[in-house]
Amino acid sequence: MKNQLESLSNPEAFQSPIEIENFDRDTLVRMLTTMIMIRKTEKQLALGRKNGLIGGPVHLGAGQEAIAVGVSEYLRKTDRVFGAHRSHSHLLALNPDFYRLFAEVLGKETGFSKGMGGSMHLFDQPSGFYGSVPIVAGTVSLAVGAAIAAKLQDSDDIGVAYMGDGALEEGVVHESLNLSKIQNAPMLFVIENNLFASHMHISLRQPSDMVARFAQANDIPYEVVDGNDVVSVSKAANRLIDDIRLGKGPRFLELVTYRWYGHVDWRDDVDVGVKRSLTDINNWKARDPIARLTAAMIATGLWSQHQTEKINQRLDNEIDKAWNKAINDPYPSLDSTLKHVYSN
Amino acid sequence: MLKKQFNYGTAICTAFEYLLEKYPEVFVIGQGLWSPWYVGNSMTDLDKKFGVERVIDTPVAESACTGAAVGASLAGMKPIVVHPRMDFMLYAIDPIVNQAAKWSHMFGGQANPGLTVRGIINRGGEQGAQHSQALHAWFSHVPGLRVVMPSTVADARDLLIASVLCNDPVVYIDDRWLYDQEDELPPLVELDLTLQGPMVTQTGSDVTIVASGHASLLAREAYKQLIDKDISAEVIDIRVLNPLNVDSIVKSVKKTRRLVVVDSGWLSAGFSAEVLASVVERLPVNLLRSCPIRVALPNASAPTSRVLEQAYYTSTIDVVDAVKKMFD
């Protein structure tokens, strides 16, 4: 495999504090808090799955929080964001209501999808999250269509499709890149390249580790960035989203990252992950987007360990309450299965 | 004054013009829309009248274009995707079956993809196995899709408008073998698709013939020939295949006590089986005066050579013969 990502895919690189440059304190604190909230929410889901309270699969994205948080910094509620199987962070970065996520994953009617979706089918259109589904690449063309709609509606809203590196192996993604370009659609493709599709390392699936080569092939401007650096992610997203809103057509953002958990549920999956070792996992944990931002903020005097502890305490408390509330919420009524097949 | 005559193709075109004129959220996307080759006379000059932004001819990308229509519908548009051969539409099964059909259900009814997918059955002319398939049964199997097959000139227009105005994903299937039918068009009314269903097009007392799409045209022609043989057939055009409401068919069969189902798809696990089963299970035991009959394509792909084609496809005579057998 060609190592076009160079050091970006090296787990031993990029472990030092990130550059926070001229970012203001409020923004940094907001992004840090959201990342911690997402991490803790997913830890709760991992635990709930492990102890059997969650009945269905959960695809956790711990370690990848900087991506959704950095990108969402420049999104509006009227943008059209679509996700995939690993989308808890995509939704929570737009709407931090972890209680409704818990309820949904537990199959309760108070959940984001009224208890009809679970972890793999999430919906919150009022916050811009049009939906996530577990068919790999299943929503990419939908996002392009929502972007084409924005153009027809004379708005400067944009379509956003989150996908993993595995999705680039699906034919429809290439159709979608081409269609978005030829239609000059206001569309942002966000690729979380965590180097794995299920158990398979990218070297076993693709001839190069950099998927942005497909943006190049479709003449779509792109950036390739460390996905574990929330400032770099948000700066790149800002540049690309600005261009898209100005009518310059689709943009492609490849973010290199790694998931701490295995493909599905709470385990490490070192035994089933081809090319997935405990050494790699530990190195990537040292490249933690939360720790690197925290360290940078402390080093510049914007933050203290004490403040992190306070946030941890508050969130732990809120998450605990939300989880218990969701556990006690009602399930959907039995007529729900037939009720939502059609619109009336 | 002579009333303007329409054929099935120009009736479809009238529906497109009406929709694009009246509803700014309507747009059309698909292959061949800027060309006279692919869609007969059913979309002539729409791009010139309404602009290439709203009548989009596309790259050869059935899946992305259909998915894009699903996404656009979620963003408040009313898109129509056109697949000039239904066979090509198989590349778009994921956005139709996995996404559009399930979207409302997966998210608790909070969003509905109100798009129309127009698939054209384009048989004959030695085009063979991959330019000929009638796959309405497949789509009718999927909960969440509405499946519509107009067989008359008026329905070609009115069911297209009703499909586009419906909030659910609709698969609208027309058949090029219907395009030459001529008729006057009644005044245009916007129908509520959810209230449409099978319709008795010819009344009779001896046998009920049920069909959809092109098979309905065969049934109507058979009706005329059967009169000469002193057989009074009642013909029912299914129109809306999913969700299927068989009330009017059951009522008719209770009267005629004979049932023939004609279908332009294959026999095996075909739509004719669904109609037959749904009707017969609601009939009193011993009501039927003869075994019900299905007339459908043999379980083989369409051949190319004209001699084989002629033998393969169902003709009016096949329908007449099937009915006559019941009276032997």
Image (tube, rainbow, N blue to C red):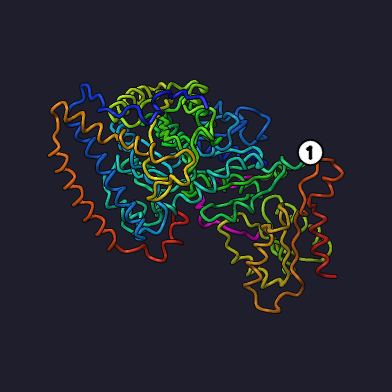
Q: In which quadrant is the N terminus of chain B drawn?
A: top right
Q: Nearer the viewer, residue A317 or A336?
A: A317
- Residue A64: within the magenta? no
Q: Does A335 appear above or below B192?
A: below
Q: Amino acid at mark 1?
A: Gly
* Residue A311: percent from left, percent from top: 17, 43
Q: Nearer the viewer, residue A334 or B154?
A: A334
What's the residue at 82%, 70% (across, down)? B327
The residue that disc 1 covers is B125
* Residue B295: percent from left, percent from top: 76, 59
Q: Is residue A318 left or right of residue A181?
A: left
SS at mark 1 in the image: loop
What's the residue at 78%, 57% (across, down)? B222
* Residue A23: percent from left, percent from top: 21, 25
* Residue A287: percent from left, percent from top: 31, 33
Q: Is residue A111 left or right of residue A144?
A: left
Find the magenta span and give its range.
Answer: B184-200
Q: Main secondary structure of the magenta part?
A: loop
